[in-house]
Image (tube, rainbow, N blue to C red):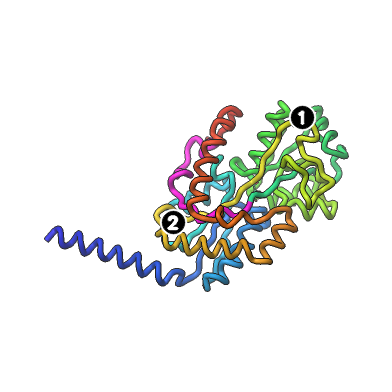
């Protein structure tokens, strides 16, 4: 009797899963962004969501759930039903949070299922338009000699702007006052309003304001200069030898999401990354979609594990933690 009920429970589960997979998606999908609207993660997510919704035949809506460097949203996604209706766009900060936060109510390396990588975004050191330094070398000197008054914005502990700022301060052996925001959207508003001095963040949000002169673009964080910002030197050129940081973005689901659902979502993601609108918009923002073989569940799962392992010793050495 007991055996029979175990078999019927297993059958029900199997049939439930099979039905979920053939019908999927049957309703609106929510894509959670762990930072404020108007920031780089939001920009990437909205472009991808628009195309995925066409492929999947259901709306894919973006919801911003900002706070604590992306960890509040990550906790929510980790606890969500793994049915393919709650997705999560996060970036390198998902990997660094594993070391930055001593206590997290979820495990970044175990509680998520990768769908695929999206893009690797270069970063830029930008300043308010009326900041005295005129170029990259001058801004480095300015930070060192004015460390007691310089303010450096970030999108919260665990944001990639925080990581870039932390690495820069370490490279310059100089600590300045950091100012956390709920995302790069509000941080950029305050740079443009001259309420804060500097920010290191992604080209997806800085290319436009640099071009229009609303902020000063001092340096890029890649080893090579960028085609979209050819006159801006690398930090390495400006004397911060070996400095390099870029922000990968990936699309995740809660762990336990059925593999056929993940594969269907990965197919829709790959279609999005080939769509002329996404390719053109990414190019105008100084980035490009990853190659199709990186926009897969296995590639993102492997990348996340490698990134957690890569950043742990670097963050431990820097001794920066959130409690
Ligand atoms: C970051 O600094 O991590 C991001 O730029 C935050 C955001 O997308 O707003």
Confirm whether residue 65 shows in the render. Answer: no
Instruction: Tell me residue 28's x, y (percent).
Output: 50, 69
In the orientation shown, which residue stands out farthest toward the left? Answer: 1
Q: Earlier in the sequence, mark 1 or mark 2?
A: 2
Q: Nearer the viewer, residue 252 or 225?
A: 225
The residue that label 2 is drawn on is 80
Q: Is residue 206 above or below residue 178?
A: below
Q: Nearer the viewer, mark 1 or mark 2?
A: 2
Q: Is residue 7 above or below residue 299?
A: below
* Crowd class of label 2 (few under 14; some 14 to 19; many from 20; radius 10 Å): some
Residue 223's tag is none
- Number of marks in the image? 2
Q: Mark 1 to mark 2: distance in Å?
A: 43 Å
Horizontal side, residue 71 vs residue 127: left or right: left
Provide the residue span drawn in magenta: 98-119
Q: Regarding mark 2 in the picture, which secondary structure is present there?
A: loop
Contact (Cβ within 8 Å) of mark 1 with mark 2: no
Q: Is residue 109 magenta?
A: yes
Horizontal side, residue 131 vs residue 10: left or right: right
Confirm whether residue 159 shows in the render. Answer: yes
Instruction: Tell me residue 62's x, y (percent).
Output: 58, 62
Q: Residue at x 45, y 54 (%)?
A: 254
The residue that label 1 is drawn on is 147
Q: Is residue 267 above or below residue 316?
A: below
* Crowd class of label 1 (few under 14; some 14 to 19; many from 20; radius 10 Å): some
Tell me the quarter of the image containing the N terminus.
bottom left
Q: Residue at x 63, y 43 (%)?
A: 160
Instruction: Tell me residue 157's x, y (percent).
Output: 60, 40
- Residue 152 figure quarter: top right
- Residue 316 figure quarter: top right
Q: Is residue 99 magenta?
A: yes
């Amino acid at each position: 009797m007991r055996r029979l009920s175990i078999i019927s429970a297993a059958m029900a589960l199997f049939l439930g899963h099979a039905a979920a997979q053939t019908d999927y998606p049957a309703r609106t999908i929510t894509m959670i962004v762990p930072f404020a609207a108007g920031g780089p993660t939001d920009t990437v997510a909205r472009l991808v969501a628009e195309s995925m919704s066409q492929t999947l035949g259901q709306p894919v809506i973006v919801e911003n759930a900002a706070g604590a460097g992306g960890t509040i949203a990550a906790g929510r996604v980790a606890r969500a039903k793994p049915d393919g209706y709650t997705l999560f766009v996060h970036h390198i900060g998902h990997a660094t949070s594993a070391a930055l936060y001593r206590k997290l109510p979820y495990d970044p390396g175990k509680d998520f299922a990768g769908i695929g990588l999206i893009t690797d975004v270069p970063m830029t050191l930008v300043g308010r338009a009326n900041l005295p330094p005129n170029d990259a070398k001058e801004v480095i000197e300015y930070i060192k000699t004015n460390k007691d008054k310089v303010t450096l914005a970030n999108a919260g502990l665990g944001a990639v702007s925080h990581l870039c700022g932390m690495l820069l301060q370490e490279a310059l052996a100089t600590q300045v006052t950091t100012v956390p925001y709920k995302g790069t959207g509000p941080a950029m508003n305050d740079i443009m309003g001259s309420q804060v001095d500097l920010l290191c963040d992604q080209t997806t949000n800085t290319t436009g304001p640099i071009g229009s002169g609303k902020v000063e673009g001092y340096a890029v964080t890649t080893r090579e200069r960028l085609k979209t910002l050819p006159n801006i030197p690398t930090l390495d050129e400006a004397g911060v030898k070996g400095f390099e940081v870029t922000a990968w973005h990936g699309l995740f689901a809660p762990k336990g999401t059925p593999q056929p659902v993940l594969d269907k979502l990965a197919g829709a993601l790959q279609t999005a990354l080939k769509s002329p609108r996404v390719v053109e918009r990414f190019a105008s923002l100084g980035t490009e979609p990853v190659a199709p073989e990186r926009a897969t569940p296995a590639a993102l799962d492997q990348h996340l594990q490698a990134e957690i392992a890569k950043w742990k010793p670097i963050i431990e050495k820097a001794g920066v933690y959130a409690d």
